[in-house]
């Protein structure tokens, strides 16, 4: 990939403002692209329209600018790209790799769970809908083969989709396209070469590689940075009431984010602002210094 200019991306969901955990992921992605002399894109992943909060997308962009994370080009908005996702689904359908599914959540409640706590689809509709059943979602077929990839933080990882995930959804019962399909289509559309994101998305990667293979799309390199958790071990999120990034003391907050990524700034930058901190971090960025394990959040001093 040395002959290709690095293109990274940050893809938040506009369900509320960014918190410290989101900042860590954004900073990692930004630094990885900038340290390589590449471009950094922002994409609003607003596929799940009912969960999106009015004004959140603008608030997120304001927060990124305030913390010095300036992006290149226009912000891509997923809710405007249904035609592209429909074309990808049509391609899967045309070669028999996608099929309608009538299963409800209650019907799948007894399905076995994988290590991530997700239900492993048992294939109830794989050979056709039961008599009288109405199609609800669309699923993509997976095989009994191991999908492997090299993660730049975690090393070589493999997953057998058939036994650990099952045929997964690419279009939901409510008519919305699924994240797995949209992210693959958009990464290819934007020419993304390097995906740097939180470790909560680590085991989405084999599904995305499977779709890239079926659709004939290039696979970017992947790196999954540590999650930031609260004292109870829960991932910082809106569900766990993670506070929004503060409007003041941004330098201290950014310095803590860099330390979380294994790049603690030197003492001489104790009072530095975002621009100076990011300039230092860009010059010193090494993905191999990023820790694998979750980090407990602590307030900036």
Image (cartoon, rainbow, N blue to C red):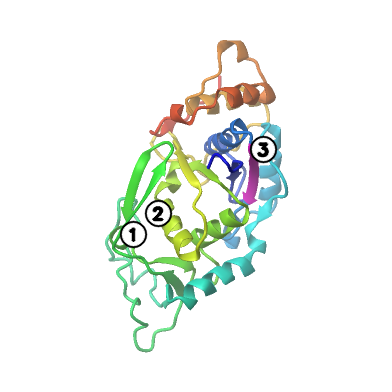
Coordinates of residue 281 in the picture (x, y in percent)? 58, 24
Q: Is there CB contact under 8 Å for labels 2 and 1?
A: yes
Give neighbour class at mark 3: few <14, some 14-19, many 20+ (Cα, 10 Å): some
Of label 2 and label 3, which has the lower sequence position? 3
User: Does the magenta run of residues contain 147?
Assistant: no
Q: CA distance from mark 3 to mark 1?
A: 36 Å
Q: Is residue 213 above or below residue 37?
A: below
Q: CA distance from mark 2 to mark 3?
A: 29 Å
What range is drawn magenta here? 38-43
Tell me the chief SS of the magenta region.
Answer: strand
Please report the residue visible at 27 percent of the width from the left and 61 percent of the height from the top.
Answer: 112
Q: CA distance from mark 2 to mark 1?
A: 7 Å
Please report the residue visible at 49 percent of the width from the left and 52 percent of the height from the top.
Answer: 219
Q: Is there CB contact under 8 Å for labels 2 and 3?
A: no
Coordinates of residue 172 in the picture (x, y in percent)? 49, 69
Coordinates of residue 69 in the picture (x, y in percent)? 66, 35
Tell me, for residue 190, which label it has, or none. none
What secondary structure is found at the residue carrying circle 1?
Answer: helix
Coordinates of residue 220 in the picture (x, y in percent)? 51, 48
Of label 2 and label 1, which has the lower sequence position? 1
Q: Of 148 and 22, which appears nearest the observer?
A: 148
User: Does the magenta run of residues contain 41?
Assistant: yes
Tell me, for residue 206, which label it has, or none. 2
Q: Of 97 and 238, which appears nearest the observer?
A: 97
Q: Of 119 and 15, which appears nearest the observer?
A: 119
Tell me, for residue 64, which label it has, or none. 3
Residue 36 quadrant: top right
* Front: mark 2 or 3: 2
Q: Which residue is mark 1?
A: 161
Q: Of 258 and 296, which appears nearest the observer?
A: 258
Residue 153 quadrant: top left
């Amino acid at each position: 990939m040395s002959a290709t200019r690095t293109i990274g991306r940050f893809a938040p969901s506009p369900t509320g403002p960014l918190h410290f955990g989101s900042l860590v992921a954004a900073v990692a992605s930004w630094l990885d692209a900038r340290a390589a002399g590449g471009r950094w894109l922002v994409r609003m992943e607003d596929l799940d329209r009912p969960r999106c909060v009015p004004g959140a997308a603008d608030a997120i962009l304001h927060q990124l600018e305030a913390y010095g994370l300036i992006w290149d080009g226009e912000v891509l908005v997923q809710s405007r790209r249904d035609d592209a996702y429909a074309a990808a689904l049509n391609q899967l359908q045309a070669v028999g790799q996608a099929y309608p599914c009538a299963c409800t959540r209650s019907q799948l409640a007894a399905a076995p769970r994988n290590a991530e706590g997700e239900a492993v689809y048992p294939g109830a509709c794989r050979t056709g809908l039961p008599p009288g059943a109405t199609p609800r979602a669309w699923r993509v077929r997976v095989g009994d083969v191991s999908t492997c990839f090299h993660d730049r933080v975690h090393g070589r990882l493999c997953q057998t989709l058939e036994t650990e995930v099952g045929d997964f959804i690419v279009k939901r019962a409510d008519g919305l396209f699924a994240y797995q399909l949209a992210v693959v289509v958009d990464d290819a559309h934007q020419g993304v070469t390097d995906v740097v994101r939180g470790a909560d998305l680590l085991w989405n990667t084999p599904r995305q590689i499977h779709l890239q293979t079926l659709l004939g799309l290039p696979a970017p390199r992947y790196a999954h940075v540590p999650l930031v958790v609260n004292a109870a071990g829960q991932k910082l999120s809106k569900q766990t009431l993670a506070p929004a990034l503060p409007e003041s003391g941004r330098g201290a907050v950014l310095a803590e984010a860099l330390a979380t990524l294994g790049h603690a700034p030197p003492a001489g930058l104790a009072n530095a602002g975002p621009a100076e901190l990011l300039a230092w971090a860009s010059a010193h960025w090494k993905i191999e210094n990023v820790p694998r394990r979750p980090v407990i959040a602590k307030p900036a001093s």
